[in-house]
Image (tube, rainbow, N blue to C red):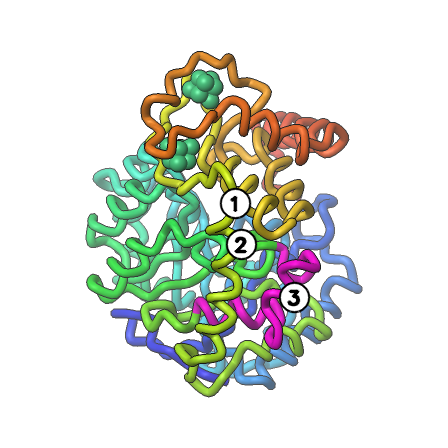
Amino acid sequence: MEYRRFGKTEELISVITLGGMRFKHGWTPPRNHLPKDSIEHCISTTRMALDLGINHIETAHGYMKSELLFGHALKELSVPRKQFKMMTKGAPMSGDETRSLVEEQLEALGLDYVDFYGWHGINNKELLKIAVEKNGPVETLHRLKDEGLIRHVGFSTHAPLDTILDAMQTGLFSFINLHYYYFFQRNLPAVQLAETMDMGVFIISPNEKGGMLFRPSEKVKNLCKPLTPIVFNGRFCLSHPEITTLSMGIHEPKHFTQNLAILNRGNYSNSELSKVKAEMDTPLAKISSLCTLCNQCLPCPENINIPEILRFRNLVEAYEMKDYGRFRYNMLEGQGHWFPGTFSFNCTECGDCLPRCPENLNIPTLLMETHKKLFSKPKYLKSKLFSIIKSALKTLKIWKYF
Ligand code: SF4
Ligand code: SF4
């Protein structure tokens, strides 16, 4: 295993993180009920990760029963506390809520302290304001740090770049969890600022949100040869010395082989990677009506996330990434601030965006073309139903029991 310094936290963590988002099995209440097979599954994967030298485990309160599962696994395996670093996250809305949530999380994890606590989802300016207000959540996290319950405070984000940079510049955080990978390089300035500010950088979901690389299109598979798409993207990320660790979504022992293959003894900026990257860059440069993701077309009065939808179009046109495009496009309108924006069919052709596009793209036409290629009605209805049920359970204050 290779290790990197997680910015000013001064902690050395493995470049591969055991991410806990997929360990959330069992959506049934009560919250503390864990199905036997889920526990065994988590134990075997955690054991294997630790044996391979992975020393960083990441979870969150929002990952349903993930914290409880890791708590069981670590206890069952009697892992010495010094052998691993634990990151968890939460999005408490006030100082008081922060303290009780962190105490609840520590109890679920069976730990006296967590190494890294991230305010979960500074996804827009309103949430940034709530997180950093006086006597608010982040200030309370720093108090809990002084009390020894948390060792380092950071944040995770899916926000537009300007909000990410604003959050970083508050100077309140030692690390950042964000999206950055080959198929989504918009956040490079944040990665670079993290280096300037000596913050650790944790990459969220490089394999799944990063392009569904475990099920790549034939074209991507061929362009990446002799590497696999997972290896290419992992090495692309690690070729940035600013990046500390990648959360690979390993949740079964069989996933280790394909993910550990990214390791290259610290040698990431090499000719093999440059060659594959050049192959990968070529098809994108050739497509017609390329959206450069400059964001200048926003805001749209119908709240259409134009650059993200046209990014899916770019990927379908250049790389035949229809599965990934469908997966992400159909998440719109179902994820709240985690994935904001409405579907293309909301476009009224008002024309507001057109004079702002430096590429002179016919945005309404491209949006509708993309919609026709990617929209799935059953997925849309399922996602709508889920968000209605979730918000009803939240209103009734029983969501936390799941
Ligand atoms: S033309 Fe469509 S996409 Fe452009 S601003 Fe108007 S509603 Fe939004
Ligand atoms: S302004 Fe044009 S190029 Fe820029 S993100 Fe919007 S559609 Fe794409």
- Do the residues under discs 1 and 3 have CB atoms within 8 angstroms? no
Q: Amino acid at mark 3?
A: Asn
Q: Position of residue 142 (x, y in %)?
A: 27, 55
SS at mark 2? helix
Query: Between disc 2 and disc 3, whose residue precedes?
Result: 3
Q: Residues within 10 Å of mark 2 (few under 14, many from 20)?
A: some
* Mark 1–mark 3 distance (CA, rounded to whole Å): 18 Å
| Identity of the residue drawn at 59% across and 74% down | 227
Residue 31 visible from this viewpoint: yes
Establish if 214 lies above or below 83: above
Tell me the quadrant of ligand 1.
Answer: top left
Per the model, the C-alpha gap separating discs 2 and 3 is 12 Å
Judge whether residue 105 can be spotted in this image. no
The answer to whether residue 198 is left or right of residue 384 is left
Q: Main secondary structure of the magenta part?
A: helix
Name the residue at 34% across, 56% down.
Answer: 188
On screen, 225 above or below 134?
A: below
Q: Quadrant of residue 91?
A: top left
Which residue type carries mark 2?
Pro
Residue located at (42% from left, 80% from top)? 270
Q: Which residue is mark 2?
A: 283
Q: Which residues are magenta?
A: 212-237
Relative image position of residue 143 (x, y in whole percent): 26, 55
In the rendered structure, are the residues bearing label 2 and label 1 in contact, judged by CB atoms less than 8 Å apart? yes
Q: Which residue has dot 3 on it?
A: 222
Q: Residues within 10 Å of mark 3 (few under 14, many from 20)?
A: some
Label 1 belongs to which residue? 287
In the image, residue 343 above or below residue 206 = above
Q: Nearer the viewer, mark 1 or mark 3?
A: 1
Question: Is label 2 in contact with label 3 (beta carbons under 8 Å)?
Answer: no
Is 61 inside the magenta-drawn segment? no
Q: CA distance from mark 2 to mark 1?
A: 7 Å
